[in-house]
Structures are given as structure tokens and as C-alpha cells.
Image (cartoon, rainbow, N blue to C red):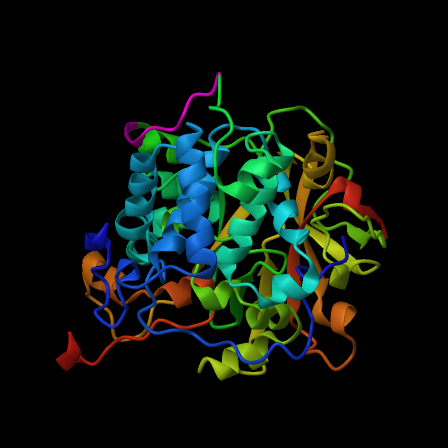
Amino acid sequence: MNSVHDMGGMHGMGPVEIEKNEPVFHSQWEARVHALNLACGFHRRWNIDMGRHSRERIPPAEYLAATYYEKWLRGLEMLLVENGLVTAKELRTGRAESKASGVSVLRASEVAGFLRVRRLARIDEDVPPRFTPGVRVLARNDHPIGHTRLPRYARGKRGVVDRDHGVFIFPDTHAMTRDKKPQHCYSVRFAARELWGSSAPARDSVYLDLWDDHLDPA
Amino acid sequence: MSDRHHHDDDHVREHDRPLSGPALRAKALESLLVEKGLVDPKALDQLIDTYETKVGPRNGARIVARAWMDPDYKRRLLEDATAAIAEFGFIGRQGEDMVALENTSKIRNMVVCTLCSCYPWPVLGLPPVWYKSAPYRARAVIDPRGVLKELGCEVPEDVEVRVWDSTAELRYLVLPERPAGTEGWSEDELAEIVTRDAMIGVAQVKAPGRSQR
């Protein structure tokens, strides 16, 4: 979706300011929100791509005004209601109307193991690649209303396949319909001048990870 | 919970003042999820402790120092970063598929996630605020040299800048250049000077003067 989360190339956002000796969390509630997101993910009612898409759907003005963990809180509330773990009324009142049934809860003793488990973004499936390293490709000029990992700044631009990462879940469908649609994911090199015009430095480039369904032969 | 506020006396203790806004909303959500039997607060404590004390850029610094010391390790890291990093036991969430990017005198790599906040947790911990901020996400791809210059890391014209936008589940670790003047240093000494920002690609590693060592 063409919303403000797709920020690459925007102007007017101000300087990058690095905070010295930054703590991991700036307050206790940020830490709780981060942990709540992980602990709720344990129920596997949604996937990581649905999670990203929830935060993208925060209305643009609110997205820009929110701090990072405010966005994670908003996104989590959306996911919980949309996937039936919490009702809208429960969220509004803060009072549980019923206990969750048939769920196993992440326990403290299971946390270390839970974080070490490989989520299966890479899929061991024999899907032939559409492109090989060195080949010129054109990023599709698509503007889906749903989730996509092809940023606006690369759409319609020509690049060269740098490397084939192998077969991965396709987030654009995974976020919307849970269809994994396994396909190759590549690192594609775009010259800075192709993306940003002739005033960009001649030798610079941007690499994006894109999938077969984002690309056409150039 | 108060013992988690060990990092900085300047930070006001959250529970010493009334909750408002997102703090209140987060607390309400946690209470609801606990009441419903969907989360165990002790697991939340454990998750927080993991990211506050066990995972962080010191992990990545050990990888870099090893690569500087051991050419064979460096070769393995550049060929298959996931496996080479797993040799240290740094695996799992947000580091499932790693790629190492080597900086040289002619190439400078810089990592961003323009669409969200993708970052290699097992080797760098959770991302800093600036990495997740609109200015960095907006500008890193269109004006990397401007960003680097602002951050005190100007790139000479004849050096190539490569920006890596983390749009998939690949996670990138920059292998910075080893600074001159560190010949004969131990791996631990080298790891000490490797910074988080150097492993994101927005700083270079500097060797401190002998007196500071």
C-alpha cells in the first residue's frame, strides 16, 4: 500500500540524530509492548508479514506522530482483535469477557528456546528461479492496495540481479491471504542514478531484496 | 521490575509517576491479556531481560574481531554469514538469514530498512531509535553521503557507497575496516573498539590513542 511507512526518498524529515548511550528501552511500557508482541506471536494466529501490515495500516498522520513502540502497540491491538484472540469490546473496556481456551501460553522457561527457533521465511522447496545473477531486471510498476515489500522508489526502475538468496515466503501474499507462494528472493542492485536521476553519484547504488513476482526481464 | 532501571539515573523511574497515554494503554492491554490467559507476565520479564542484557552489539563486535584476526573465519563469514555467526551461538529471531558486507578502502556499505525496522537482533540487539526514525529511513537511500557526512563519516568521492535496504528476511551486518594502529591487538581488544554504528555502516572503527587503551 502506498502509505507513509514507505519512506525511502522522502524529503523534509529532518536530521538523523544519534542518541549517545541509548538504553534498549526508554521506559518500562516500551519494554512491555515489545515483549507482549513476541509473547502474543507465540500463539501463531498471525505471521510476521501480517504484523508488518498492521503497523502500515495506522493512518498516515498518526503513523508519523507515533513513537516506535506506540506503533507496535497499535499494531498488536489490531492483530489481537482481527485474529480473534481479543474482542473489540474487551479491548475497549479492558475487561475479559471470557478466558482463552485451547491455547498454550509462552512460559518464562520456554523463552530462550522460543527466540532461538528459526521462523521459516526460507522454504526448502524446489522452485526454479526466474532470474540468475548478472541478469538485468525491471521492478514492476505495481501499486497494490495491500502489503508489498517493493518500495515505491524502486518501482519501474531497472537493476541487475546481484545474488539469488534462495526460495522464501512471498510477503505480499502471505500478509493478505496467508498464501506463502514460495519463490526466489534476490538481492537486486539499482544504480543511484537510475533511482534518483543524473545528479546522484555515478558509482553509488542501492540493493533491495526482491522476489520473482516483483520483477520482469529488462 | 525496578531493578531493570539500572542503565541511567537520569531516567525517571516509570512507576514513580502516574501512567499516561501509551503507558496506560500498554498496561491495560497487558492486564487484559493476562486475565484472558494469553500471556504469562513472567515470560514478558524474561523476554525483556533477554534484550536488555543478553543480546546486543557486543555479539556483533565479537564476529567482527574474529574476522579481523582470522582470515579463514572471514572467508566463511563472507560466504555464509548465517553459519559463521552461528559458530558463536548467535542465532534465531531476526537473524535467521544473515549476510555480511565487507567494507574496503574502495567500498562503503550502509544498512537501512525504509519500510519498517528490520535489523539483525542476534548480533546487534534491538535497533536504536535513529535507525527506526523517519529521517534515516527516508534519507539513507536517496542521500547516503549526506547522512554519513552529518554523522561525521564523510565518504571520499572515489569510494563507492552501497546502501542495503532490508526489504526481505535477510539481515545485514557490515564488516568494517580494521583501523590502522591495531596490529598485534588481541581479539578481545579489537572487539572493544567495534561499535554498533560501524556494524550498521554509518561510522568507521577508530583506534583510540595508546593512552586510552
Residue at point 57% right, 29% down?
Answer: A45
Q: Is B208 on the left-hand or right-hand side of A52?
A: left
The answer to whether any part of residue B169 appears in the image is: no
Span of residues in magenta? A102-109
The answer to whether any part of residue B11 appears in the image is: yes
Q: Is residue A79 above or below residue B156?
A: above
Q: Residue furthest top?
A: A102
Q: Is A129 on the left-hand or right-hand side of B126?
A: right
Q: Is B70 on the left-hand or right-hand side of A207?
A: left
Of residues A29 and A188, the one drawn nearer to the viewer in this rendering: A29
Q: Is residue B10 above or below residue B120?
A: below
Number of marks drawn: 0
Of residues A97 and B205, the one drawn nearer to the viewer in this rendering: A97
Q: Position of residue B67 (x, y in %)?
A: 34, 54
Q: Is residue B51 above or below residue B12?
A: above
Residue at point 35% right, 32% down?
Answer: B40
Q: Is residue A201 above or below residue B169?
A: below
Q: Is A17 on the left-hand or right-hand side of A48?
A: left
Magenta-span inclusion, residue A104: yes
Q: Quadrant of residue A23?
A: bottom left
Main SS category, magenta section: loop
Q: Quadrant of residue A47?
A: top right
Residue at point 75% right, 68% down?
Answer: A195
Magenta-span inclusion, residue A160: no
Q: Position of residue A130 (x, y in %)?
A: 78, 37
Of residues B14 and A126, the one drawn nearer to the viewer in this rendering: B14
Residue at point 40% right, 40% down?
Answer: B31
